[in-house]
Image (tube, helix red, strand yellow):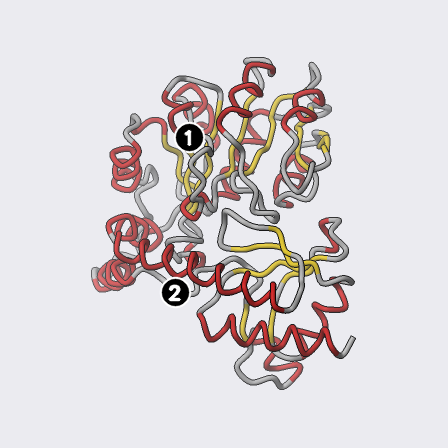
Amino acid sequence: MEELERELGINRPIKLASNENPLGSSPMAIKAINLALELDGLHRYPDGSGFNLSKKLADMLEVPQDNIVLGNGSDDIITILTRAFLKNNDEAVISESSFLMYEISVRSCGAKPVFVPLKSFAQDLDAIAKAITPKTRIVFLTNPHNPTGSIIKAEDFTDFLDRIPSDVITVMDEAYIEFATATDSINSIDLVKAGKPIVVLRTFSKAYGLAGLRIGYGVMPGMITSILERIRPPFNTGILAQAGAIAALEDKPFLQKTLKLVKKEISFLYSELDILKLDYIPTQANFFLIKTGNAKQIFDALLKEGVIVRSMASYGFEDYIRINVGLHEENVRFIKTLEKVMKNG
């Protein structure tokens, strides 16, 4: 946003590109962070185990504390996982048009990403199962899927697990799970409790509004945790991040306010796009895809008007942009600006 103001001279741009929380951060988290600053402990290293935060998460999810691994964002845990379980010529199966960190982390270990096309904007579990070979060590899935917002149904996932070898780790990235309202989605935490070889990734960046602190976590069987803890950097989560995350978990009113806003504003955006006769992909997250035609051109035109969205051309969706839900006034401005640039061609 600062770059847009500096280079194009645009005042008060709005950003609907990174799936961030439009309400900002949890007030309780901000208070806890300020208290941590007042204690003047920043010259000390943080608790390397993140004991208080991992205990809080374990209690909330009703899992043993040694099932939790903390990370500098969930990206950090993806990197640790690939370092732990992939070597040269191993394979990891990834749906096309998914979070780019999966591929980056796999390739950094000398392993090979095997891409499987989406089916009707959703992950094709049948095709993913068929893509698994004796070289496969990890499968990356996302629920809800980024960038399409689709979910994995419990029935489909049960069938999928029955088809894959027990020594293949399934990574279930749930960065946006708090926003999902579908009743038939999988409960991945219950599968971890059942001892399945599943790693569930979650983050405080989205629903909890702590993207700037870089704090996330993984939930997994203890046998996987014990391996990751051997190579996890000892101080990968900071004092302020741990303090903010603990408080954010307590701030249930802020979380509910966020979810209520997202639900209301998605309905508003859908209705406005219907008026404009633009197609979109219904979502279970706080973002969704809009079919505009020539996504790069529309992205550039919106940018010049001070509205930052995400072109999906690099994901293979040449005709789609992705937006996340903003405040109501931001969403109104987006719709008016989109209508303007679409009319201008």
Classify 10 Å Cα crowding around label 1: few (below 14), some (14-19), many (20 and above): few
Looking at the rendered structure, the number of numbered marks drawn on it comes to 2
Q: Which residue is mark 1?
A: 187
Residue 270 in the image: state x and y as whole percent. Answer: 55, 61
Residue 158 in the image: state x and y as whole percent. Answer: 51, 20
Q: Which residue is mark 2?
A: 24
Residue 208 in the image: above or below residue 130: below
Taking the spot 64% from the left edge, 69% from the top edge, the residue there is: 276
Residue 243 in the image: above or below residue 309: above
Helix, strand or loop status at disc 2: loop
Q: Is residue 176 left or right of residue 138?
A: left
Q: Quadrant of residue 340?
A: bottom right
Residue 170 in the image: above or below residue 180: above
Relative to the observer, which residue lies in front, 275 or 198? 275
Q: Quadrant of residue 177?
A: top left
Residue 188 in the image: above or below residue 77: above
CB of mark 2 within 8 Å of CB of mark 1?
Answer: no
Q: First in sequence, mark 2 or 1: give its number.
A: 2
Residue type of the residue flagged with mark 1: Asn
Residue type of the residue flagged with mark 2: Gly
* Camera-side mark, 2 or 1: 1
Q: Is residue 272 left or right of residue 187?
A: right
Residue 142 in the image: state x and y as whole percent. Answer: 55, 38
Helix, strand or loop status at disc 1: loop
Which disc is residue 50 wearing? none
> Which corner quadrant holds the N terminus?
bottom right
Taking the spot 39% from the left edge, 61% from the top edge, the residue there is: 261
> Which corner quadrant holds the C terminus?
bottom right
Taking the spot 31% from the left edge, 33% from the top edge, the residue there is: 61
Relative to the observer, which residue lies in front, 21 or 124? 124
